[in-house]
Image (tube, grey):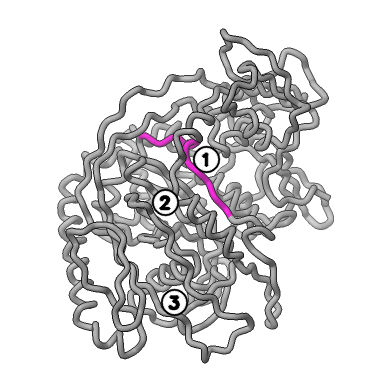
Amino acid sequence: MKRFLRFLFAGVIFRIVIPVALAVFVVMGIFNVATTLRAQQVERDTYTAQHPVYIATASSIEAESDESNLGEQWVSAGGWDIIEQFATNTPRPDPAFATNTPAAPDSSPDATPVAPEVVASPTTAPVIASTPEPLPTILFLGEPSANQPQPTALPTAFPVIDRRGANLVNILLMGQDNEVTGDSLARTDTMIVVSINRDANTVAMLHLPRDLYVYMPQVGMGRLNTVYGVGSALGWDGGPFFYMRQVILYNLGINVHYYAMVDLTGFASLIDTVGGVSLAVDCAIQDYQIIGAEVPSGAVLSDPEALQYTLPVGYYTMTGAEALWYARSRGNSDDFDRGRRQQQLLRAAFRSARDNGLLSDVTRLPGLIQEGLAVVETDMPFDTILSLAPLALQVNPSDIETYRLIRTYHTQPWQPPDGQFVQLPVFDPVFELMNDFYTPPTDNQTALRAATVRVLNATGSPNFDWVAAERLGEANFAAVPSGEFETTTEPTTYVIDYTGSEKGSSLAEILRTLKLTEAQVRVQPDANRAYDYDVVVGADYNACGGAVLPPE
């Protein structure tokens, strides 16, 4: 049964194939719901029985609460601050999502993809009913002991981010590398929090840098990617993920309810299962061969003596092993940019699963089950997965919000006496980012992103319209790559504004995303326009969105 649940979770987050399994597993679902409820009751009874012991050992305890009052509340017990978070599960109608995300191109980098026509969003959406269910309780630890000598001052607890009554489910996606390192201490070099707002029907992703320097109970300061392994080594009550949840809440103020962990081989397997991924490389990546991964077929051998490869800017289709190289590479970039690429891969995997029919073809389920059973470790209950399935059917990859910390703004680089390089979180910018992460797009933001954008390639190189369109997609514009411009090449990139710079225009965001200036705008008002904007990608195009050095 545990392996079965692991596969189901992989379907929602990594492959999004759960919706097609609903009819098949209704009977099994009833059994799992009963099992989950029994496990929750056992856990609750255990906390109650050990209440005095927790106080005596300065461990956190679960506060007594009225479960009929669902929401987020603070309780004081035994001198410790404790937070309880429950789901409200109020059924809400789904918003309309655009369905004009570009389809994947041919696997050859030189092939010209075919962009679909813009399809109008539906005017109505079905109401998703859900059964009220309390989410796992987070037990907030007290302040660290002053007797713990540390290389830097121990931080106080981060303020808990206000959900503003929203019904959120936060899932921590982790990738660990001990199959390559051979270490007994598992390091989670990939950490992405997926936050699902079941009231607004929105999804957001937040990348957590592996080198973030955080406070860990009973240990002191350390890198975030070691927390899971430390929790395992300590034999922490509730397991290593329970320890991880405590650390994330204490240092960042957000409650993570569930987790899913995959190793490198499992990651590559998941990508292959959805048919590979098609994505834009908007920053040339340079690195060597990486253990367990394959250099993408579109890369060129830039240094034969050192066996160094360069993956140029372009649009590529990658296998699982090639995607692993792209996700792990840091040769001319850093962990912050690697997080950006990992979020991009999740979007691409979602799109591939949808475009390859994995959301609707029940005949492929047996094979998918065999491939997915053993690659994902998760604690997510079956009934919770079922409650999220309708959203997986509705959401569009371009509607997924992405957030990440920026080096030297959200963090301050620092080197402790042990010689490792870490990132100290800067409170004010991180607090603002966490609040943004919890806040769904406003009506004004949604309206601005509803602008229609056509992207035309005038670089003389293939598929740059797809590269620019995906860059705009990261900013939540549903841009349409539309092939070659009327002239073969243009020396500079520019935007044709057919709206006449109307009030509340999306133009400023388009320019910021593509790193253009107002001097690169041509205003041509057209009341009968087919698109609000044309982006003509010229030979000077460079919208590299990450901390990436130019290839040597």
Can residue 37 be seen from the camera position used here? yes
Task: Give the secondary structure at mark 1.
Answer: helix
Tell me the quarter of the picture where residue 224 sits: bottom right
* Spatial CA span between label 3 and label 1: 32 Å
Number of numbered callouts drawn: 3
Q: How crowded is mark 3: few (under 14 residues within 10 Å), some or many (20 or more)?
A: many
Q: What residue type is labelled 3?
A: Gly
Q: Residues within 10 Å of mark 2 (few under 14, many from 20)?
A: many
- Residue, disc 1: 348
Query: Which residue: 33% across, 68% down?
Result: 83
- Residue, disc 2: 195
First-in-chain label (2 vs 3): 2
Compared to residue 107, the image places residue 454 above or below, namely: above
Q: Nearer the viewer, mark 3 or mark 1?
A: 3
* Spatial CA span between label 2 and label 1: 18 Å
Indicate left or right for 301 with 351 as reference: right
Does the stretch in magenta take in 400? yes
- Residue, disc 3: 231
Q: Which residue lies furthest to the top in this view?
A: 528
Does the stretch in magenta take in 160? no
Q: Give the range drawn in magenta.
A: 394-404
Q: Which amino acid does label 1 sit on?
A: Ala
Q: Which of marks 2 and 1 is in front?
A: 2
Indicate left or right for 61 with 160 as reference: left
Tag 3–tag 1 contact (CB < 8 Å):
no
- Residue 150 percent coordinates (x, y): 59, 85
Q: Residue 446 carries which label?
A: none
